[in-house]
Amino acid sequence: MYVAVKGGEQAIARSLELLAEARRGDTAVPELELAQIRGQLRLGVARVMQEGSLYDEELAALAIRQAAGDMLEAIFLLRAYRTTLPRFGYTLPLDTTAMRVRRRVSGTFKDIPGGQVLGPTYDYTQRLLDFDAAVAAEVAPADVPLPSDMPRVLDLLDAEALIERIEPGSDPEPVDLTREPLMFPADRATRLQNLSRGDEGFLLGMAYSTQRGYAESHPFAGEIRMGEVDVRICPEELGFAIEIGSIVLTECQMINQFHGGNGVPPQFTRGYGLTMGEGERKAMAMALVDRALRCDELAEPNHAPAQNQEFVLSHSDSVEASGFVQHLKLPHYVDFQAELSLLRTLAAQHATDAEEQPLSAAGGQRS
Amino acid sequence: MTYNFAFLDEDTKRMLRRALLKAVAIPGYQVPFGSREMPLPYGWGTGGIQVTAALLGPDDVLKVIDQGADDTTNAVNIRRFFHRVAGVATTEHTAEATLIQTRHRIPETSLREDQILVFQVPEPEPLRTLEPREAETRTLHALADYGLMHVKLYEDIAQYGHIATSYDYPVLVDGRFLTSPSPIPKFDNPKLDRSPALMLFGAGREKRLYAIPPYTSVESLAFDDHPFEIQRWEQQCELCGSGESYLDEVVVDDRGTRMFVCSDTDFCSGHRMEAQA
Amino acid sequence: MSALLQVRGLGRRYGQRIGCEDVSFDLHPGELLCIVGESGSGKSTLLNTVAAQQAPSSGSVRYRQRGGGWLELGALGEADRRRLAREEWGFVTQNPRDGLRLNVSAGANVAERLMALGMRNYSQLRGIARGWLERVEIDPARIDDAPTSFSGGMQQRLQIARTLVTQPRLVFMDEPTAGLDVSVQARILDLLRRLVNELGLAAVMVTHDLAVARLLAARTLVMQGGRVVETGLTDQILDDPQHPYTQLLVSSVLTT
C-alpha cells in the first residue's frame, strides 16, 4: 500500500554527511589552511568580502573553503553571518585622495602628476599557463618611492570647469540598504550602494551592453586607483574622530561625454565605482552602470536595460537571484496539481469543441 | 558562538513587529521592511522565517508545512532551524500549534482565534506580471486602480472560457487592497475570508509584509456571471476517504497509474484515526 | 452656454526653449477645436499641457466638472488627475500602439475602461465591446483577436472605440490620422465626424493637416513657434487667412 513520503529529516542528515565528505575530498591531501586562501587566493577573498559586504579576510577565506570555492555560496555565507553582527556605528566618509596608492592608471592623460603606476596587475601577463609558478618571485625595489600625495585626475578637469562639479557635503545622508528596503525611484547614493553589493558578472554584462549601443555614454577611464585607505569613526562619547584601521579599496572614476540638456551645459560627467579589496573589473563595470543610471537626471533618452533602475537594481544581487532561481527545485506539487486540473478541464473542453464542429459540417451536407 | 533567541537580534525583531502592526492596521497593504539576510536562501521562505522569528516566544508550539505536509524537506529544514535557534516545541498537529508557518497551503482543519498562520510569499505584488514597474504598481494600489487585474480575468474567459488562474488567485482584502494570497491553490481562498486566525504574509526577497487580520472580508475576484469557483475532484483520498480535502496526485508505477491522497498530511492521518475509532 | 475648458495664458518651457507660450482659448460642450501648425510649432506640447499630462510653466487650465464646479488642473493631485483621465476624459494617440494594450484581445481593450469604472458582468462587457467594434467598423467576430493582427487603420479605430466606450465628456486627439494611407485616413475622419455628432463630444484635436480641420472643426487655432498666430471659425480662417503664416499654410495646401 502507498504510504505518504516520510523521512525528510533523515534524508537531510545523510545529505549533509555526503556534502562534508565531498568538500574535504581526498584526506591524504592536507586540508587547505585559511592563511593559504587569504595569501594565495586574495582576489577571490576580495570578491567575497565586497559582495558579502563584510571586510574580514579571515572570515571570507573560511567561507570560500566551506563553500568549496563556490563564490556565490561563500558570499551568501558571509551575508548570513553579517546579519547577526551588532551595529556599533557608521564610519566617517572614506577619503580616497589620501589613499596609499599601490596601483593608479588613467586612460585620459599620457602623464599625470604622481605618474601612472601599474602595480600588481594581470593586464600584461600574456596569459600563458605558468607551469613553474611554485618558484617564488623576487621583487626589485622601486627606484623612486611613490609620492605620498596623488591628486585625482578628475580634479585637473574640474579646475577648468570642464567636468560636472559635485559639491562636497551636498549629498544627503545615505540609507543603509542592509537595514532599509530598496524603494523606487532610488537616489544615486542608494543606487551606488546596491551596485557595490551587486554581482560582478551581472554588472559586467550590463556595463558591456552600454558600450555596444544599449545606452550611449562614451566613457573614458579617467582614473583607477587601488591602495589602502584609513577608516575613521567618530564615537558620540568622544566627540572626535579616531582611526580604527585601514582597508584596501579599488576606485574607478569614469569620464563620460555629455551634450548638455536639462539646463546643464555640455561638459564631461562622471560615473563612479568602488569596491573593497582589489576589484578593478567590478569597479569599472560599476562606474559605467552608475553613469547609465543617471539618464533621467541628465534628461537623456531612457531606453536601454542598463538605464532602467528598476531593472538593474532589482536584479543585481546574487544572493537574491540565486535563491529565487534555485527555489524552483523546492516542491511545487500543490500548484502543479492546480495547473494539471485546469489543463485537463481546458483539454476536455477543447475536445468537445472539436467534436461539435464536424457535426455541424455533416448537417450542412444533408441540407 | 551562540545566536540570539530565534536567531534575529531584538532590534530587528522590534522593527519587524512594528511593520507587522502596520500591516494589521491596513489589511492587505504591502509594508516595505528592512528584510535581513537569513541563513536560508531567498525564495525558500526567508520572509516567513523572519515573521516567525519576530513572533516566536518560548511557550509557542510551532508547526511548519510545505505543500500541506510536515515532512517535506524544506518544512523539515525550517523546523530544524527554529528548534536549533529557539528551542521551541514543535508539532505536526494543526490543532496543537500556536504558530503555523506554511508554504502553498492553508491547513484543512479550521483555525482558531489563538492561532497565527504565517505564509511564505515569493511575489507579493499581484499586479507584477501585468505591470513590472514597482513605482507604478504602488501608485495603482494607492488609487485602488485595479481595472488592469480585471482585464487579465476578462482575457482568461475570452481565451479559455474560464478564469485560468488556479493558484495565487488574486483577492480584494477588506474591500480595499488587491492582494496576493501567496501561491496557495484557489481551493484555499475561501478559508481566508473572515478567518478567526490572524494571517501574516512575509516576502523576504521582495522586502514586503502584509496581513489579513481576524474576521476580515477577503473576496476572490470574479465576474457576476463567472463567479469564483474552487477545484473539485471526482476522486476521494485513497488513504482516508475524505471527499472535501485538496488532493495530491501521486504516480505509483511506471505505467502511469495514479492515486489521489490528501495534500494535508496531518488532516489525512487524523481522518484515518477517526475512521478506525 | 458655459465653457467646459478654459485656457488662459498657458506656457510650457523646456529649460530655455519655449514649447508653447501665452495660449488662451475656451472649449464649449459639443465643440471640436483643431490646433493646426507645422511640426515643432508647439501644438503637441500645448495638447499635453492642456490634458494635464505635463505641468504648465505659466498660465492656467480650468475644467468644469460634472457638478458644475471649476477644477484648476495645475493644482490637481495625481489621484484626481488619473480619476479624470479614467472617468471623464479620453486621449487618442497618434500611434495606436501607444494607446492600446497590445498583449490582450480587442475586446479586452474596449472593455478595460468599463471595468476600471466597476462593471463586473462579463456578458454585458462583451455585448458593449461588440457594439463598439461594430460602431467603428470592425467585424465583431474579431473581438478575441489580438490588436497586433489588425491593420494600422483598424488599430486606430480600435483605439477610438476603447477611448469613447465610457462616453467621456472631453477627448484629446494627437494627429489621429497621421501616418495612415490617404484612403484609410478618409474613413477614420468620416467615422470621427459621425461619432462626434452622435455623442455630442467636446474634443481638442492636434493636426498638421488643414483639410482635417476643415472637415471636423468649427473653430481652429493656428500655431507658429509656440504661439497662437490666428484663431477663429475654421471656414473663415481657410477662406480668408489674416496672418501671413496662415496665408502660407493655406496656399501650400491649395497648390498641392
Image (cartoon, coloured by chain):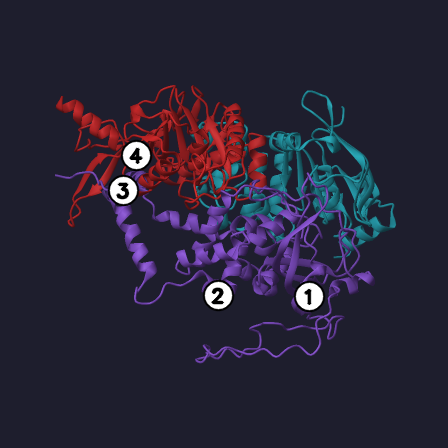
Chain colours: A purple, B red, C cyan
User: Toward the viewer: A124 or C1?
Assistant: A124
Where is residue A52 drawn, in percent x and y? 51, 52
Circles 4, 1 touching at the beta carbon (< 8 Å): no
Disc 2 versus disc 3: nearer the observer: 2
Circles 2, 3 touching at the beta carbon (< 8 Å): no
Q: Mark 3 belongs to which amino acid?
A: Glu
Per the image, the residue denoted by label 3 is A9
Q: Is residue C29 above or below residue B256?
A: above
Give how far apart the Cα atoms at labels 2 and 4 are.
45 Å
User: Toward the viewer: A307 or C5?
Assistant: A307
Q: Quadrant of residue A357?
A: top left
Q: Do discs 2 and 4 belong to a common subunit?
A: no
Circles 4, 3 touching at the beta carbon (< 8 Å): no
Counting residues from the start of the chain, the first of labels 2 and 3 encountered is: 3
Q: Quadrant of residue C141?
A: top left
Per the image, the residue denoted by label 4 is B68
Disc 4 versus disc 1: nearer the observer: 1
Give residue A41's mark: 2
Q: Mark 2 belongs to which amino acid?
A: Leu
Secondary structure under tag 3 reads: helix
Where is residue B86 drawn, in percent x and y? 39, 34
Q: Mark 1 belongs to which amino acid?
A: Glu
Q: Is residue A176 above or below residue B108?
A: below
Give residue A223's mark: 1
Disc 4 versus disc 3: nearer the observer: 3
